Image (cartoon, rainbow, N blue to C red):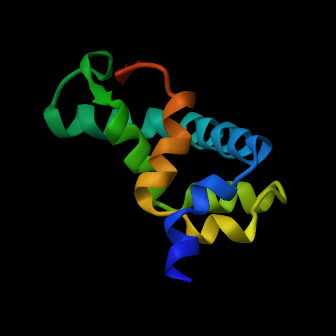
Amino acid sequence: MAKLMDHALELLSDEQKQNIQHAALDVWDSIGWDCFQCLADERETRIESVTMSRDDVLELILDANRLDAELKDKDQWAAIMDGLSYDEWQRVLTPAFLHDRYGI
């Protein structure tokens, strides 16, 4: 079982990877503005001056389980996805997020 989980990423089809990437972009579209506004409020600055690294964006998408819910809502969840490690999720998502930093 551990060996399967170590290589779950290799078992995803290209279509499944694309579905994951599209769902992640939808999640980011849904939460991104609020994340930037929260940071701006915390830093007492304008939202336009706030940026986040790609790694921070990916972490926000993955940590809230919103990506899982988005995929399940679209009937695109596959059992193999349960076996993906955090690093494997990041490797799938990174090609969809082309910039090193994100902002408004």
**Rendered position, 9 above or below 85:** above
User: At 31% from the left edge and 23% from the top edge, which residue is drawn?
Assistant: 47
Which quadrant holds residue 55? top left
At x 76% / y 48%, what residue is drawn? 13
Residue 51 sits above or below residue 76 on the image:
above
- Residue name at image x 72 percent, y 71 percent: 79
Quadrant position of the C terminus in the picture: top left
Residue 85: x percent and y percent? 46, 63
Asked if 52 appears above or below 9 in the picture, the reply is above
Residue at the right extreme of this rendering: 75
- Whether residue 52 sits left or right of residue 29 in the image: it is left
Residue farthest along the left direction in this orientation: 43
Determine whether, in the image, residue 53 is placed left or right of residue 8. left
Q: Percent position (x, y) of residue 15?
A: 79, 42
- Work out whether residue 94 or residue 103 is closer to the camera in this orientation and state it: 94
Q: Position of residue 63 (x, y in %)?
A: 42, 59
Q: Quadrant of residue 14?
A: top right
Whole-percent x, y for residue 81 in the image: 64, 64
Regarding residue 3, the answer to whether it shows in the image is yes
Q: Is residue 61 visible?
A: no
Of residues 76 and 44, the one drawn nearer to the viewer in this rendering: 76
